[in-house]
Image (cartoon, rainbow, N blue to C red):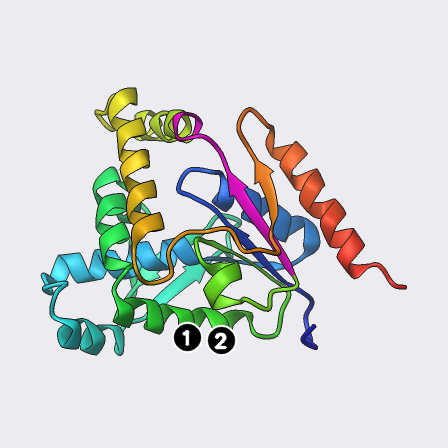
Amino acid sequence: MNERTRGLVIAIDGPSGAGKSTIANQLAKRLGYKQIDTGAMYRALSYLISQVGIDSGDMDAVKRFCSDVDIRLDCSNGTQRVFANGQDVTSQIRTPEMSQITSVISALKPVREALMKAQRKMGSNGGVVLEGRDIGTVVFPDAELKFYLYASPEERGRRRFAELIDKGEQVTLEETIQAVSRRDDQDSQRDLAPLKQAEDAIPIDSSGVGIEDVLEIMEAAFREKTAKP
């Protein structure tokens, strides 16, 4: 185990809509850790790339762009705000369209290399809860505590549908479930850092399970990991 000065590195991986952001936020607060929402970082960078119109097939152009971009997460007011090159893009990056765009752009090598470097720097001293799709397998394979949070596509689609309706989006439940399934296929079948469960991760099925129940499982694992012999 690595000697970290601020605590453990906790990885929460899983598919879109499994509840990772909510769980990571609550777990970090309870442990006094910092939350690093890597999915938001990928969405923010993908948003910038899509806005400037860079050809995703031009790896040199993508690499140049990624080398001079600033992605920042701000949780100072109790809720996470996402900034990309100084612009608050919190709302813009959470649309169904951006979910599909992000799945494509996040698979590009220059994008993953740039953000992985930033994430490792942010979490190297520990005391962090990172959530994403490849934290425990690629970004921090040496994380002291790993979880794989999942739920059925139908369950995740229903959750996402409720979120979109609350935001005033004009979508149907069927369309949302189909979008979730497409995202699953894209994330699990990509060549670079595909979505998969780390061998040493604790699997948690969040289908029909309350947030508190999931947190209890994670906190119990944390106590066991940090218990003095």
User: Mark 1: which amino acid?
Assistant: Lys
The disc placed on residue 117 is 1
Q: Which residue is drawn at 62% across and 69% down?
A: 126
Q: In which quarter of the image is residue 23?
A: top right
| Residue behind mark 2 | 121
The disc placed on residue 86 is none
Is 147 within the magenta? yes
Q: In which quarter of the image is the C terminus?
A: bottom right
Depicted 52 relative to depicted 206: above or below: below
**Between 189 and 134, the one nearer to me in the picture:** 189
Where residue 122 appears, x then y in whole percent?
50, 71
Q: In which quarter of the image is residue 164?
A: top left
Q: Does residue 186 appear left or right of residue 128 in this picture?
A: left
Residue 190 appears anywhere in the view: yes
State the extent of the magenta-drawn residues as a range: 145-155
Q: Residue at x 27, y 78 (%)?
A: 67
Where residue 2 appears, x then y in whole percent?
67, 75
Q: Using the numbered discs, state the Cα–Cα distance from disc 1 to disc 2 in whole angstroms.
A: 6 Å
Q: Residue at x 50, y 44 (%)?
A: 20
Q: Does residue 113 appear left or right of residue 3 in this picture?
A: left
Where residue 222 appears, x then y in whole percent?
73, 53
**Between 94 and 148, the one nearer to me in the picture:** 148
Badge count: 2
Q: Are marks 1 and 2 in contact (CB under 8 Å)?
A: yes
Residue 168 appears anywhere in the view: no
The secondary structure type at the circle numbered 1 is helix
Q: Quadrant of residue 15?
A: top left
Q: Does residue 24 appear left or right of residue 225 in this picture?
A: left
